[in-house]
Image (tube, grey):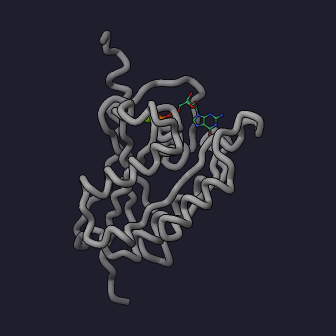
Amino acid sequence: MASRKKVLLKVIILGDSGVGKTSLMNQYVNKKFSASYKATIGADFLTREVLVDDRQVTMQLWDTAGQERFQSLGSFDALDSWRDEFLIQASPRDPDNFPFVVLGNKIDVEESKRVISTKRAMTFCQSKGGIPYFETSAKEAINVEQAFEVIARNALLQEESEEFSGDFQDPINIHIENERDGCAC
Ligand code: GDP
Ligand code: MG
């Protein structure tokens, strides 16, 4: 069998502060959840190796911070701003078909505290050309695997990924955040 090249997918997790971006990434990569809130400083990435249809894929997940500028809009209206800003900054080759996935996190929280209805979220995703939508819980590991699998599949389909030859080394798990915990600032 001809050896297929390893694929590196860069996934960027965007959204307002406090929605659970860091938690989703931690659940997906480390299968851990922490209820205590630690603001992310700068950007960190974690990697996870997955097989997608027998294809070995390295998912490089970028966590982000500095979301405060959109916070006054409220989480959901901000989603459009995140999408637009991403398209401006990243200028992907085919913006209309960029493989976005929308996650509505904290689905474990009681329904009365819900801010955005499923219907509204789905209507939004449909209006943007059919973005896949998942309701997740980083706390209870609901739909996290499924959401990231669709992210990987759709990104692979785009052929936007960077490919590496066979000598690509094992990825290194880096989580810089903890190093900053001791910081007095
Ligand atoms: P970020 O600012 O988007 O990275 O958000 P964090 O991942 O730091 O999460 C913010 C807060 O929400 C933390 O206290 C988390 O423990 C909590 N949290 C994150 N995901 C979930 C979830 O799925 N369910 C519940 N109940 N809490 C969550
Ligand atoms: Mg964070």
Q: Quarter of the image containing the N terminus?
A: bottom left
Q: Quadrant of residue 15?
A: top left
For the residue pair 35 and 85, the one nearer the viewer reads as: 85
Q: Residue at x 53, y 44 (%)?
A: 76
> Can residue 96 be seen in the rendering of this structure?
yes
Figure check: 155 above or below 41? below
Q: Residue at x 45, y 31 (%)?
A: 72
In the rendered image, residue 23, in percent from the top left (x then y), is placed at: 52, 38
Residue 87 pos. (x, y %): 30, 58
Residue 51, visible in the rendered structure: no
In the image: residue 99, left or right of residue 103: left
Q: Is residue 73 left or right of residue 27?
A: left
- Residue located at (37% from left, 51% from top): 12
Q: Quadrant of the C terminus?
A: top left
122 vs 29, nearest the viewer = 122
- Quadrant holding ligand 2? top left
Above-or-below relation of 182 to 49:
above
Residue nearest the observer in this picture, 145 or 128: 128
**Which sits in the foreground, 16 or 155?**
16
The location of residue 86, given as percent across then percent down, is 32, 53
Residue that sits furthest to the top in the current view: 184
Residue extending farthest bottom = 1
Count the marks: how many? Answer: 0
Residue ID at (42%, 48%): 13
